[in-house]
Amino acid sequence: MKGIMIRKIIVSAVLALIAPFILKLALNKVLVGINLASGATLAEALSTLPNVGVIYTIVALIFFGITFVAALAVPARRRRNRSSGTVVESDVDDGRERGMVKWFNVKKGFGFITWDDGEDVFVHFRSIRGQGHRSLTEGQRVKFMVVRGQKGPQAEDVSVVRG
């Protein structure tokens, strides 16, 4: 969360720094044909104002405020757990069993879940919902389907329960 906020601040600051220059270029294009009584164009008169730096600073601050508020209004996209591609779901009753991860060896890609009825269930990383690096952490609450394998019960369709 902290990293996302820093990113939003940096993007807003960079946009705010270039905004006055883009505004000046746009005004020069729009105001090119407007002449003042003194004979100078309006674009030339605006660029020779004594406090141009102050005006640029005010425009930059206004633009920073607008872009930062807009960035805050956009919610961060839903992310998976940073350390894994494992899906995290809310604990709604969907017909799957519940249990707690007894242990999971990330290097070997398997482990065991202690079923809420007390029995241990084998789990392989391919049975975990998600993409990329899927793993479980000891003590996590999980939902899963149970299938009977050659060596006993196996967990399929495993997802972590949001706690």
Image: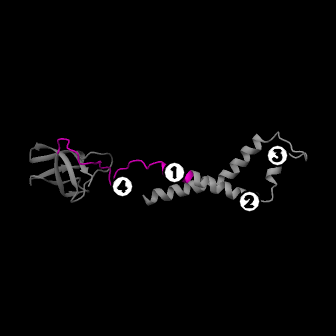
Amino acid marked by disc 2: Gly
Foreground: 10 or 39? 39
- Disc assigned to residue 71: 1
Where is residue 33 shown, x and y percent of the image?
82, 39
Of circles 3 and 4, the one toward us is 3
Amino acid marked by disc 4: Arg
Residue at which label 2 appears: 53
Task: Tell me what residue is drawn at x 51 percent, y 55 percent.
Answer: 8
Q: Main secondary structure of the magenta part?
A: loop
| Segment tinted magenta in the rendering | 67-96
- Would you call the spot at circle 1 few (<14 residues within 10 Å), some (14-19), or many (20 or more)? some
Residue at which label 4 appears: 82
Element carrying mark 4: loop
Ranked by sequence position, the earlier of labels 3 and 4 is 3
- Tell me if 121 is positioned left or right of 86 in this view: left
Cα distance in 3D space between marks 1 and 3: 34 Å
Where is residue 9 shown, x and y percent of the image?
53, 57
- Would you call the spot at circle 3 few (<14 residues within 10 Å), some (14-19), or many (20 or more)? some
Element carrying mark 1: helix
- Disc assigned to residue 83: none
Cα distance in 3D space between marks 4 and 2: 44 Å
Residue at which label 3 appears: 42
Give yes or no for residue 93 being in the magenta stretch: yes
